[in-house]
Image (tube, coloured by chain):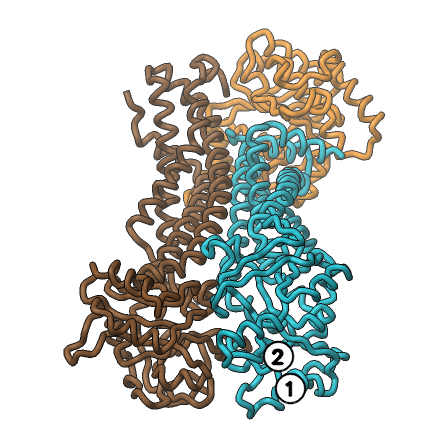
Amino acid sequence: MNIPLFYSLRSIWQRRMTTILTLGGITLVVFVFAAVLMLANGLEETLVETGSDANVIVLRRSATTELVSQITRNSANIIKTHPEVKQLPDGKPLASTELNVIINLNKKGSNDMGNVSVRGISPEGLLLRPHLILTSGRMFTFGTNEIIVGKSLAEKFQGVELRKQLKFGDGQWTVVGFFDARGTAFESEIWGDVEQLMPAFGRPVFSVVLFQLRDPADFTSVKERIESDPRTQSSIAKREIDYYRESSQTMSMFIKILGLVVTIIFSIGATIGAMITMYAAVANRTVEIGTLRALGFRRRSILGAFLFESIVLALIGGAAGVALASLTSLIRISTINFSTFSELAFGFVLSPGIVLASLIFAVIMGILGGFLPAARAARMQIVSALRAS
Amino acid sequence: MMIEVENVSKAYHRDSIEIPVLNNISISVPEGEFLALMGPSGSGKTTLLNLIAGIDRPDNGSIVINGTDISRLNESQMARWRADNVGFVFQFYNLLPVLTAFENVELPLLLTRLSKKERRHHVESALDLVGLGDRMGHTPKQLSGGQEQRVAIARAIVTDPTVIVADEPTGDLDKVSAEEIMTLLERLNTEYRKTIVMVTHDPRAAEKAHKFMHLDKGELS
Amino acid sequence: MFVLRLVLKNALRHKLRTSLTILGIGIAVMSFGFIRTIVTAWSAGVEASAATRMITRHAVSFIFPLPLAYRDKIARIPGVDQVSYANWFGGNYKDPNDWKNFFPRLAVDDETYFDLYPEFLLSTEDVEAFKKERNACIIGAKLAREHGLKRGDLIPIDGDIYPGEWEFVVRGVYRGKDATVDETQMFFHWQYLDERVGQTQPMRVGNVGWYILNVKNPDEMARVAQEVDAFFLNSRAATKTETEKEFQQSFVSQSSAIISSLEIISIIIVGIILLVLANTIVMAARERTREHAVLKTLGFRPFHVIGLIGGESMLIAIVGGALGLALTFPVVGGFAESFPTFFPVVELQIMTILLAVAVAVFAGVAAALFPTIRTLRSRIADGLRAVA
């Protein structure tokens, strides 16, 4: 015989104040849990989408990031001629020799400066990133000091406007367009002609070579070829996707660990709050419990009823927490990527997996918080329960 | 007159509904009287008792006790007045469960300027009077219903109040204990000249009183 | 006195509930202290900056080098007391994906660097030994401890900014003057770096990462900065000179989003403390509605009753807070040992302790707020009728 559900639900309603307080605690904890997962997810999405699985990036072997990588012109030319590199209709290889450096720009609204990534590309560089779209102005002309700027930068730094000039390196650079890169890391970059930027920064070598595979399955053979060729053996080839995933590892790991520690601590607090409320609920309804038992309801049903209440409470708090967390998707975070040293903008991204995980987490808190009190309720002796008042 | 209730009305407000409880009541209680207020449920007798004890305020009219119009006092003054003048005995004893019998009886004395020794003296006298001198260190859990009520009575008299107010003092007791309590109250009235106003349903309890008043639907009948 | 005794007895009435509440508050206070410690550790570099040290770097960004030739010119600017220089070497030590292997590796001018950083304490024997060998290096005591390195050990580095296989031999270990000093750095001879670069990439010789200046008079710092930058304004490599504090701050402020999130989290923690405590106090007050009414009947004033409610709330809050503080110490200690190079300086500051106490007190007061208002507003007669 099961205790009617409305009994449990009615009891929750009667103790509104303490119920609200307990709910508040659970909501907060689930909010933090979901927000952290969303943040790590957002970071990963930004960085992983930045790469394409048809592209290969070649860096210097010991370089963990483009910034410290060096590829000579010779090496670049050799790499571009490999058969696995896709060819454009006119016979040229679909490959871009690129430079990556950091400059400082003044942030809007404060005296601080921020690190900004500047990327020199070859004309093929655009073709290798088809998801990049100009949102205003036009593409820069190769051979000139024109640049295009990721739209995140326009919002955050001073003096970044169309037809205005930015001063860095050895000259003035005119902003001729803004671009959108679907939320990927490129949106925090400035792009220009690599052959203009190299001498401006006094760099005689490229940072990396990026090319597209004729056939994605060719990756292993071209990697082997590059790394065993004595002329290019100081280089390493990676799938672009893997490169970006690795560069986000440290940050992602840091956020996840910090978030996990914080959430664990919070959830202990919320579970304790839930326990206190449930214990009180049990104590207050001693006579009711005795009566129900006297009427014939079994211990199991009592246990079930209290656990059910606890879980319902947790689910409501969990749903509220997830709802609150989904509001964070309106926030964009910008912070320094520990690996590449440049500023990276990303946001909170919700996924069905995160919603599910958060609700399950809430339910677990409800079960943990409610279990011991429910067990106490079930264990009560009918006679002593009836006598208590 | 010890107690003069004049043209008193009182209504309760539940949500937005007004429920009249007392309707233009006037009563007089001379000093040394033992009065029983009786009537059916909802007749307003407990409300009247609360007004006399100073724990509630009338909507209209005045209540003068031993020369003081308590309906004119503010909260703070009422509290002081209660401490000095009223001893209350409840149906469910209302002892503080974490305190011993001694400490419960001592409670009202903490509001006075008496020294610890003086307080001890009063508490012991009160507990002796109710016949519980040997149970001073017990907590309410360790006492029977009748004993608890006796401790409550000791608490009610320890400040030597002018009026003792009792709300169904025997309502929760068995026949024997009820008898003991009523005998005690009677003693307080006849030997110690305490004015007692008591609300009760119990005819046996009512027997000990000297004067009776019936209330019905907020009016004397 | 009496109220205190009653408060204590009331709290002990429901031992389980009171202990759970204390535990909940303790854990929350501990996490508050812990998170604040992370936040302060983040800016530890900023705080440790010396009052009269300045950094001169390439105006475009710190990744571009400055010519060595600038040294003498900077030294001649009036107000500049001493000049030294350093290069960020970088490179990979063992597995670069294990963050435990990250620590600052700098090529420095051995004549002057340690004069400008007096907080790195070195014995004269160490300094002598260091100067004698080309590829000698000096490491911090915490670094030595973390990686089990001692004098005579070899440190192999796979260079990235400066490609090639490098090997350094430990010839000295420095200690920090106090707990705020970073003991995880490694220093070697700039000469050695320049020599090897000359052999492999001759175009890069004679280049310095940044200059460190010591100014005689702190009031002169703004002027000196301006003069240095003005001097090199139209040169090939323009400079940006700022105080060491500003330099460190510019790195910290880039992670400001993370720091802000941590601060927001610590505020949420305060909220949780409040909820857990308020939950218990509301329950306790409700149970004692009738008792409080009885006390009022006896003549106790509202403020006595508030004292009981507030007293119990404060008692639990303070005991919970004390527990939390006690737990914070070992947690902070464990954290300091786990990320030695990311957070080289971790200490539980007095301010954090004071804040934690303030939070507990605030919670004690706030949790009692609603029950207090309720009891002030309630009528005695209703209170007497209440069923707990």
The label on residue C228 is: 1
Front-most of A287 and A61? A61
Dot 2 or dot 1: first in sequence order is 2
Residue C90: give x, y in percent of width and height: 52, 65
| A148 is higher (above) or lower (below) than B215 | below
Residue name at image x 28 percent, y 76 percent:
A125
Residue at point 33% right, 15% down?
Answer: A296
Distance between the alpha carbons at the discs numbered 2 and 1? 8 Å
Disc 2 chain ID: C
Q: Is residue C233 visible in the rendered structure shown here?
A: yes
| Residue in the foreground of this view, choosing between A294 and C175 | C175
Q: Which amino acid does label 1 sit on?
A: Val
Categorize mark 1 by other alpha carbons within 10 Å: few (<14), some (14-19), many (20+). many
- Does residue A76 sit above or below B64 in this rendering? below
Name the image quarter holding the N terminus of chain C: top right
Chain C hue?
cyan
- Up the image or down, C364 lies above or below A329; here it is above
Chain B, colour shown: orange
Residue B57 falls in which quadrant of the image? Answer: top right
Label 2 packing within 10 angstroms: few (<14), some (14-19), many (20+):
many
Q: The brown chain is which one?
A: A
SS at badge 2? strand
Question: In this orientation, does residue B70 appear?
Answer: no
For this orientation, the residue located farthest to the left is: A89
Q: Which residue is drawn at 60% across and 47% down?
A: C363
Say if A214 sits above or below A377 in the image: below
Cβ–Cβ below 8 Å for labels 2 and 1? yes
- The tag on residue B138 is none
- Residue at label 2? C56
